[in-house]
């Protein structure tokens, strides 16, 4: 009836995480008799009774509800193709792109053009690997200016932090606008180039040290020292 590991511990496949029926296996774990066991190498995440293991590496796999950053790669008469860092391009239809009435044959590049970066949301993933996106929702928009960096998709929850606590520390210290996509792309925009570079360094540090305990305090200290 006990936990065998601590929250944020690194575990390997086959490692026992908890014994008894008090906890429930989630992503990256399975139950075998009375034990909950890790099915992949990663970071333990304990949330109430749920135990999951977040992979430390691996490619992005889209899920409905994910907010992602993508790049427009193709425009047809009725939709846009968007690269979201997955094996298959995602689809943004006219209906989900805008509430405007668009006449048949209109130039769709006036809305989103080749190469444009967008913050968008996954609303559908089917068995044929077709991914549908929407631009309708808070924070979903075309991204202008700024710079893009890449992080490990599985470490995005750590970069964001509980209720956005970790990324808020970076935003406030650097006075930068930052958008973190579940697909591991991060958009940073700021007035001062040195503060943009500092935000980038801080985010890469969180990515590389996601397994550490007390990382929030360490990032706060890191930013304060660099800003002196």
Image (cartoon, rainbow, N blue to C red):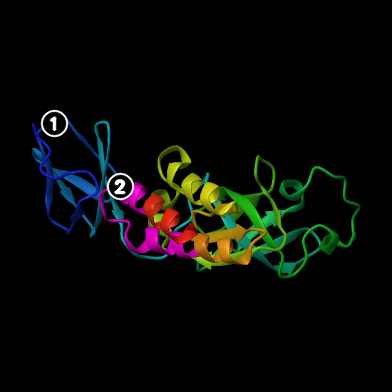
Above or below residue 109? Residue 53 is above
Above or below residue 149? Residue 91 is above
Determine whether label 2 and label 1 are within 8 Å by CB. Answer: no
Q: Residue at x 69, y 43 (%)?
A: 136
Check disc 2 and report its element: helix, strand or loop. loop
Q: Residue at x 49, y 51 (%)?
A: 170
- What is the quadrant of residue 188 in the picture? bottom right
Q: CA distance from mark 2 to mark 1?
A: 17 Å
Q: Would you say residue 89 sits in the magenta stretch?
A: no
Quadrant of image for the N terminus: top left
Q: Main secondary structure of the magenta part?
A: helix
Q: Residue at x 67, y 59 (%)?
A: 191
121 with respect to 127 (left or right) = right
Check disc 1 and report its element: helix, strand or loop. loop
Q: Tell me where the magenta segment starts and ends, as one range.
A: 200-218
> Residue 176 appears at what percent x and percent y?
60, 54
Q: Would you say residue 205 sits in the magenta stretch?
A: yes
Nearest to N terminus: mark 2 or mark 1 = 1
Mark 1, residue position: 21
119 with respect to 9 (left or right) = right
Mark 2, residue position: 27
> Residue 124 appears at what percent x and percent y?
56, 48
């Amino acid at each position: 009836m006990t936990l065998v590991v601590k929250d944020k511990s690194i575990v390997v496949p086959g490692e026992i995480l908890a014994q008894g029926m008090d906890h429930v296996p989630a992503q990256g774990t399975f139950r075998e008799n009375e034990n909950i066991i890790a099915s992949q190498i990663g970071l333990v995440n304990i949330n109430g009774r749920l135990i999951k293991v977040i992979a430390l590496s691996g490619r992005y796999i889209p899920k409905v509800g994910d907010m992602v950053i993508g790049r427009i790669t193709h425009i047809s008469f009725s939709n846009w193709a968007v690269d979201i860092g997955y094996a298959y391009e995602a689809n943004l239809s006219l209906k989900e792109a805008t509430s405007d009435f668009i006449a048949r044959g209109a130039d769709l590049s006036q809305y989103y053009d080749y190469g444009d970066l967008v913050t968008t949301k996954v609303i559908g993933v089917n068995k044929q690997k077709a991914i549908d996106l929407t631009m309708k929702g808070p924070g979903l928009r075309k991204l202008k200016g700024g710079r893009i960096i890449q992080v490990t998709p599985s470490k995005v929850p750590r970069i964001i932090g509980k209720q956005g606590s970790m990324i808020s520390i970076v935003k406030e210290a650097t006075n930068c606008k930052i958008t973190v996509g579940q697909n591991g792309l991060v958009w940073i925009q700021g007035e001062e180039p040195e503060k943009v570079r500092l935000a980038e360094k801080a985010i890469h540090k969180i990515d590389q040290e996601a397994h550490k305990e007390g990382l929030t305090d360490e990032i706060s200290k890191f930013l304060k020292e660099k800003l002196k």
